[in-house]
Image (tube, coloured by chain):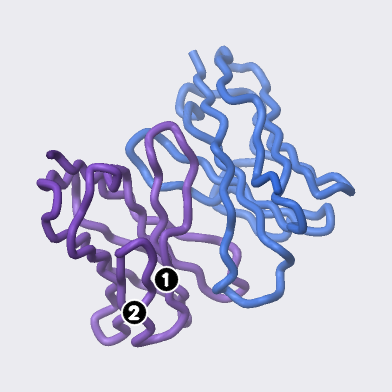
Chain colours: A purple, B blue
Amino acid sequence: GNSVTQMEGPVTLSEEAFLTINCTYTATGYPSLFWYVQYPGEGLQLLLKATKADDKGSNKGFEATYRKETTSFHLEKGSVQVSDSAVYFCALVTGGGNKLTFGTGTQLKVEL
Amino acid sequence: DAGVTQSPTHLIKTRGQQVTLRCSPKSGHDTVSWYQQALGQGPQFIFQYYEEEERQRGNFPDRFSGHQFPNYSSELNVNALLLGDSALYLCASRPGLAGGPGYEQYFGPGTRLTVT
Protein backbone atom coordinates (compact mmCIF):
# COMPACT_ATOMS: atom_id res chain seq x y z
CA GLY A 1 0.00 0.00 0.00
CA ASN A 2 0.88 3.67 0.01
CA SER A 3 2.54 5.42 2.91
CA VAL A 4 4.26 8.72 3.68
CA THR A 5 6.88 9.33 6.33
CA GLN A 6 7.69 12.82 7.56
CA MET A 7 10.25 14.08 10.03
CA GLU A 8 8.99 14.46 13.56
CA GLY A 9 8.21 17.89 14.90
CA PRO A 10 8.01 20.40 16.25
CA VAL A 11 10.65 22.21 14.27
CA THR A 12 11.55 25.54 15.86
CA LEU A 13 13.45 28.12 13.81
CA SER A 14 14.37 31.76 14.06
CA GLU A 15 12.96 34.13 11.47
CA GLU A 16 14.99 34.16 8.21
CA ALA A 17 16.44 30.70 8.90
CA PHE A 18 16.54 27.97 6.24
CA LEU A 19 13.85 25.32 6.43
CA THR A 20 13.92 21.68 5.40
CA ILE A 21 11.16 19.22 6.21
CA ASN A 22 11.94 15.70 5.05
CA CYS A 23 9.36 13.50 3.36
CA THR A 24 9.79 10.02 1.93
CA TYR A 25 7.16 7.75 0.47
CA THR A 26 6.29 4.26 -0.67
CA ALA A 27 3.69 3.84 -3.36
CA THR A 28 2.12 1.26 -5.62
CA GLY A 29 2.18 2.82 -9.00
CA TYR A 30 3.41 6.24 -10.02
CA PRO A 31 2.36 8.85 -7.44
CA SER A 32 1.70 12.54 -7.60
CA LEU A 33 3.13 14.34 -4.58
CA PHE A 34 1.80 17.24 -2.56
CA TRP A 35 2.57 19.49 0.37
CA TYR A 36 -0.40 20.82 2.30
CA VAL A 37 -0.31 23.42 5.09
CA GLN A 38 -2.71 23.72 8.01
CA TYR A 39 -2.82 26.95 9.98
CA PRO A 40 -4.25 26.86 13.51
CA GLY A 41 -7.99 26.29 13.52
CA GLU A 42 -8.20 25.94 9.75
CA GLY A 43 -8.50 23.23 7.13
CA LEU A 44 -5.79 22.16 4.72
CA GLN A 45 -4.46 24.34 1.91
CA LEU A 46 -2.44 23.03 -1.00
CA LEU A 47 1.03 24.55 -0.85
CA LEU A 48 2.64 22.92 -3.88
CA LYS A 49 2.59 19.76 -5.98
CA ALA A 50 4.63 17.71 -8.45
CA THR A 51 3.21 15.07 -10.75
CA LYS A 52 6.28 13.45 -12.28
CA ALA A 53 9.89 12.67 -11.49
CA ASP A 54 12.28 15.66 -11.35
CA ASP A 55 9.38 18.13 -11.29
CA LYS A 56 9.87 21.00 -8.87
CA GLY A 57 6.79 22.41 -7.17
CA SER A 58 7.04 25.93 -5.79
CA ASN A 59 4.81 28.48 -4.10
CA LYS A 60 5.24 31.38 -1.65
CA GLY A 61 9.00 30.76 -1.48
CA PHE A 62 8.59 27.06 -0.69
CA GLU A 63 10.02 24.43 -3.02
CA ALA A 64 10.07 20.64 -3.27
CA THR A 65 11.55 18.37 -5.94
CA TYR A 66 10.10 14.97 -6.84
CA ARG A 67 13.02 12.53 -6.49
CA LYS A 68 12.00 9.11 -7.75
CA GLU A 69 15.40 7.54 -7.14
CA THR A 70 15.26 8.35 -3.41
CA THR A 71 11.44 8.33 -3.15
CA SER A 72 11.57 11.72 -1.52
CA PHE A 73 9.82 15.09 -1.72
CA HIS A 74 11.55 17.32 0.83
CA LEU A 75 10.10 20.77 1.51
CA GLU A 76 12.50 23.74 1.61
CA LYS A 77 12.35 27.48 2.11
CA GLY A 78 15.31 29.79 2.12
CA SER A 79 14.05 32.29 4.71
CA VAL A 80 11.12 31.52 6.96
CA GLN A 81 8.81 34.09 8.50
CA VAL A 82 6.74 34.03 11.67
CA SER A 83 3.66 33.76 9.46
CA ASP A 84 4.92 30.38 8.17
CA SER A 85 4.20 28.82 11.56
CA ALA A 86 1.79 25.99 10.83
CA VAL A 87 1.60 22.22 10.41
CA TYR A 88 2.89 20.88 7.10
CA PHE A 89 1.66 17.62 5.58
CA CYS A 90 3.28 15.64 2.82
CA ALA A 91 0.81 13.57 0.78
CA LEU A 92 0.55 11.41 -2.30
CA VAL A 93 -2.08 10.07 -4.62
CA THR A 94 -1.92 7.23 -7.13
CA GLY A 95 -4.15 5.63 -9.73
CA GLY A 96 -7.51 7.33 -9.99
CA GLY A 97 -6.14 10.32 -8.22
CA ASN A 98 -8.66 10.82 -5.46
CA LYS A 99 -7.53 9.09 -2.29
CA LEU A 100 -4.84 11.21 -0.68
CA THR A 101 -2.44 9.44 1.68
CA PHE A 102 -0.95 11.83 4.24
CA GLY A 103 2.03 11.81 6.52
CA THR A 104 1.56 12.58 10.20
CA GLY A 105 2.46 16.23 9.76
CA THR A 106 5.35 18.38 10.95
CA GLN A 107 4.69 21.41 13.13
CA LEU A 108 6.83 24.43 12.32
CA LYS A 109 7.28 27.24 14.84
CA VAL A 110 9.10 30.37 13.70
CA GLU A 111 10.23 32.81 16.36
CA LEU A 112 11.47 36.40 16.12
CA ASP B 1 -16.76 32.26 -5.11
CA ALA B 2 -17.34 30.30 -1.91
CA GLY B 3 -14.93 27.53 -1.18
CA VAL B 4 -15.80 24.27 0.53
CA THR B 5 -18.11 24.86 3.47
CA GLN B 6 -18.89 22.51 6.34
CA SER B 7 -21.40 22.51 9.17
CA PRO B 8 -21.50 22.50 12.06
CA THR B 9 -18.14 23.87 13.17
CA HIS B 10 -18.12 22.03 16.47
CA LEU B 11 -20.21 19.21 17.84
CA ILE B 12 -20.33 17.33 21.13
CA LYS B 13 -22.01 13.93 21.27
CA THR B 14 -22.30 11.07 23.73
CA ARG B 15 -21.08 7.53 23.12
CA GLY B 16 -23.66 5.47 21.27
CA GLN B 17 -25.32 8.45 19.61
CA GLN B 18 -25.46 9.15 15.90
CA VAL B 19 -24.15 12.24 14.13
CA THR B 20 -24.55 13.85 10.70
CA LEU B 21 -21.99 16.25 9.26
CA ARG B 22 -22.59 18.34 6.16
CA CYS B 23 -20.45 19.61 3.32
CA SER B 24 -21.02 21.88 0.34
CA PRO B 25 -18.35 21.60 -2.34
CA LYS B 26 -16.62 24.45 -4.08
CA SER B 27 -18.57 25.87 -7.00
CA GLY B 28 -18.02 23.77 -10.11
CA HIS B 29 -16.89 20.69 -8.17
CA ASP B 30 -18.91 17.49 -8.23
CA THR B 31 -16.68 15.03 -6.37
CA VAL B 32 -16.58 15.05 -2.58
CA SER B 33 -14.26 13.14 -0.25
CA TRP B 34 -14.32 12.87 3.53
CA TYR B 35 -11.29 12.55 5.81
CA GLN B 36 -10.88 11.96 9.53
CA GLN B 37 -8.03 13.78 11.27
CA ALA B 38 -7.31 12.61 14.80
CA LEU B 39 -5.41 14.98 17.06
CA GLY B 40 -1.75 15.16 16.08
CA GLN B 41 -2.23 12.91 13.04
CA GLY B 42 -2.57 13.31 9.32
CA PRO B 43 -5.99 13.02 7.69
CA GLN B 44 -7.24 9.52 6.90
CA PHE B 45 -9.45 8.91 3.86
CA ILE B 46 -12.97 7.74 4.71
CA PHE B 47 -14.75 7.67 1.33
CA GLN B 48 -15.51 9.57 -1.83
CA TYR B 49 -18.76 10.37 -3.61
CA TYR B 50 -19.37 11.12 -7.26
CA GLU B 51 -22.69 11.14 -9.09
CA GLU B 52 -24.42 10.33 -5.79
CA GLU B 53 -22.55 7.05 -5.41
CA GLU B 54 -19.75 5.97 -3.12
CA ARG B 55 -16.82 5.38 -5.46
CA GLN B 56 -13.94 4.63 -3.15
CA ARG B 57 -13.68 3.75 0.52
CA GLY B 58 -10.88 3.73 3.06
CA ASN B 59 -10.43 1.42 6.00
CA PHE B 60 -13.41 2.55 8.07
CA PRO B 61 -16.22 0.41 9.51
CA ASP B 62 -19.78 0.40 8.21
CA ARG B 63 -20.76 2.74 11.06
CA PHE B 64 -19.45 5.43 8.74
CA SER B 65 -21.81 6.10 5.86
CA GLY B 66 -22.47 8.94 3.52
CA HIS B 67 -24.69 10.45 0.94
CA GLN B 68 -24.37 12.85 -1.95
CA PHE B 69 -27.27 14.96 -3.16
CA PRO B 70 -28.10 16.07 -6.72
CA ASN B 71 -26.61 19.52 -5.96
CA TYR B 72 -23.30 17.72 -5.12
CA SER B 73 -23.45 18.50 -1.40
CA SER B 74 -22.71 15.61 0.89
CA GLU B 75 -23.36 14.22 4.35
CA LEU B 76 -21.25 12.02 6.55
CA ASN B 77 -23.13 9.88 9.08
CA VAL B 78 -21.54 8.07 11.97
CA ASN B 79 -23.61 5.63 14.03
CA ALA B 80 -22.96 4.18 17.47
CA LEU B 81 -20.31 6.75 18.28
CA LEU B 82 -17.18 5.68 20.11
CA LEU B 83 -14.75 7.81 22.07
CA GLY B 84 -12.20 7.10 19.33
CA ASP B 85 -14.39 8.85 16.78
CA SER B 86 -13.43 12.19 18.31
CA ALA B 87 -11.58 14.01 15.55
CA LEU B 88 -11.65 16.80 12.99
CA TYR B 89 -13.69 15.69 9.98
CA LEU B 90 -12.60 17.29 6.75
CA CYS B 91 -14.47 17.47 3.48
CA ALA B 92 -12.62 17.96 0.22
CA SER B 93 -13.93 18.59 -3.29
CA ARG B 94 -12.56 18.48 -6.79
CA PRO B 95 -13.97 18.69 -10.31
CA GLY B 96 -14.83 15.23 -11.55
CA LEU B 97 -13.14 11.88 -11.27
CA ALA B 98 -11.20 12.35 -14.47
CA GLY B 99 -8.43 14.84 -15.02
CA GLY B 100 -5.59 12.94 -13.50
CA PRO B 101 -4.10 12.76 -10.03
CA GLY B 102 -2.60 16.22 -10.24
CA TYR B 103 -5.97 17.82 -9.69
CA GLU B 104 -6.03 19.81 -6.50
CA GLN B 105 -8.51 18.83 -3.83
CA TYR B 106 -9.90 21.82 -1.94
CA PHE B 107 -10.51 21.29 1.76
CA GLY B 108 -13.11 22.82 4.02
CA PRO B 109 -12.35 24.09 7.54
CA GLY B 110 -13.65 20.89 9.11
CA THR B 111 -16.09 19.87 11.83
CA ARG B 112 -14.59 19.20 15.24
CA LEU B 113 -16.46 16.23 16.76
CA THR B 114 -16.02 15.43 20.43
CA VAL B 115 -17.50 12.20 21.79
CA THR B 116 -17.87 12.02 25.58
Residue drawn at x 71%, y 68% as measured from the top left: B97
Please state if A109 lies on the left or on the right of A105 as rendered: left
Please state if A110 lies on the left or on the right of B1 as rendered: left
Give SS at disc 2: loop
In the image, residue B48 sits, relative to residue B36, either above or below, namely below
- Expressed as whole percent of the image width and height from the top left, the position of residue B59 reads 54, 50
Residue drawn at x 83%, y 52% as measured from the top left: B52
Q: Are marks 2 and 1 in contact (CB under 8 Å)?
A: yes
Please state if B47 lies on the left or on the right of B55 as rendered: left
- Expressed as whole percent of the image width and height from the top left, the position of residue B78 reads 65, 31
- Residue B47 visible somewhere in the drawing: no
Task: First in sequence, mark 2 or 1: give its number.
Answer: 1
- Expressed as whole percent of the image width and height from the top left, the position of residue A1 reads 44, 68
Give SS at disc 1: strand
On the same chain, marks 2 and 1? The answer is yes
Q: Chain of mark 1?
A: A
In the image, residue B39 sits, relative to residue B41, either above or below, namely above
Q: Which residue is mark 2?
A: A66
Residue drawn at x 86%, y 47% as measured from the top left: B71
Which amino acid does the dot numbered 1 rest on?
Answer: Leu
Q: Chain of mark 2?
A: A
Q: CA distance from mark 2 to mark 1?
A: 7 Å
Q: Which residue is mark 1?
A: A33
